[in-house]
Image (cartoon, grey):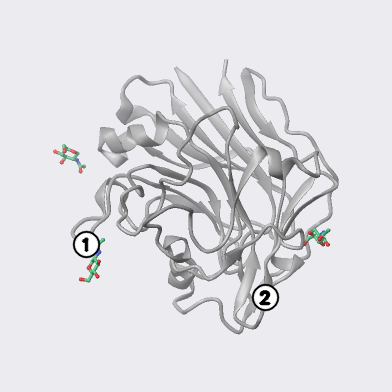
Amino acid sequence: MRFYTFFVLLVSDFFVLQIDASPLARRNHSKSPTKPGFKKVWYEEFTSKNGLATNWIYDTGTHYPGNDQVAQWGTWEIETYTTDPKNINITNGVLYITPHLEAQAYLNLKAFGEFPSNENIPTHAFRDAHYKGWPATGELDIMESVNGNRDASGMIHCGWYNNKSGGPCNEPNGKGGSVRGVGRGLWNTFGIEIDKTSSNWKSQKITWLFNGARKHSITGGQVNNSVAWKALVNKKFFILLNVAVGGSMPDGVAGAQTPNSKTLDGDSVGMAVDWVAVYQQN
Ligand SMILES: *[C@@H]1O[C@H](CO)[C@@H](O)[C@H](O)[C@H]1NC(C)=O
Ligand SMILES: *[C@@H]1O[C@H](CO)[C@@H](O)[C@H](O)[C@H]1NC(C)=O
Ligand SMILES: *[C@@H]1O[C@H](CO)[C@@H](O)[C@H](O)[C@H]1NC(C)=O
């Protein structure tokens, strides 16, 4: 009988190929809203300048820590994540993650994984060289947007991936959909809703929301594998906010190698996040 909602409020995301770069609309801190019938079980409003160090984990460099970690974050991205305030900082209650091109070849960004700090979650059992963690561990992409386009993709990753089969989540692409016409340089709300009101896993549903409206969804029946589905809806997750540069997703969408001569860096292509909240139905 659980019903969770994750919300992320943010603007322009990810590396941009030339088109439609807009300066981020400046905004001062606003609060994550209350929702009637729901308890706000966790939230982050970026009110403390030092909050990143205490509430979140920085993933730095070019791969997750530990042995057997695949280079370039497992997806051929070229950024190096840093903790430099130029790349990641909190200003007036807003988190800014901003890519900067350095030394000709690299954009120097910052990502960070996060989760409520009282929960013991294996944050880095994620993408190793042999796909031991991913995609079986489950991944819920609330919002991904590449190459400056106006699509916000919402996908799940689950099950297994090898050369014979993409598994129940059609890896490496995943399953899901996208929202079109997402304005850049504007404040938008992105969320997912995990609806477990049905005890039949095939009827349970993950729905993507954009500015409060339900846009697309996927059911357990569409995944058609109970182990893979339950890894998505029955376990704890950490929340990851990042701006990447290059990699298989933007390359695939562009049909060309990225970044390239059209790629921009700096404030016009950064990501700003005002709040993140997790709600649970009463
Ligand atoms: C924080 O990031 C914003 C957006 O990139 C930038 O304009 C500002 O100068 C940064 N602040 C610091 C202290 O680097
Ligand atoms: C898929 O096949 C390629 C080429 O045969 C091989 O290099 C790669 O390791 C295989 N990947 C997996 C996940 O088995
Ligand atoms: C769902 O999984 C069952 C059991 O593995 C299989 O028999 C069935 O063909 C699958 N349905 C679809 C639509 O793939």
Determine crowd level at label 2: few under 14, some 14-19, many 20+ residues with C-alpha closer than 10 A.
Answer: some
Which of 207/9 is in front?
9
- Observer-nearest of 119 and 229: 119
Quadrant assignment, res 54 = top right
Tell me the residue that label 1 is attached to: 163
Percent of width and height locating residue 132: 31, 50
Q: Position of residue 157 (x, y in %)?
A: 38, 48
* Residue shown at the point (69%, 60%) measured from the top left: 184
Q: CA distance from mark 1 to mark 2?
A: 35 Å
Asked whether the viewer can see residue 30, the reply is yes
- Rendered view: 279 above or below 25: above
Above or below, comparing residue 242 to residue 211 in the picture: below
Q: Is mark 1 within 8 Å of ligand 2?
A: yes
Q: Few, some or many C-alpha atoms within 10 Å of disc 1 (few <14, some 14-19, many ≥20)?
A: few
Q: Amino acid at mark 2?
A: Leu
Q: Quadrant of ligand 3?
A: top left
- Give above or below for 60 relative to 232: below
> From this viewpoint, which residue is outermost toward the front?
67
Residue 18 appears in view: no
* Numbered disc 1: secondary structure: loop
Report the label total. Answer: 2
Query: Residue at label 2?
Result: 101
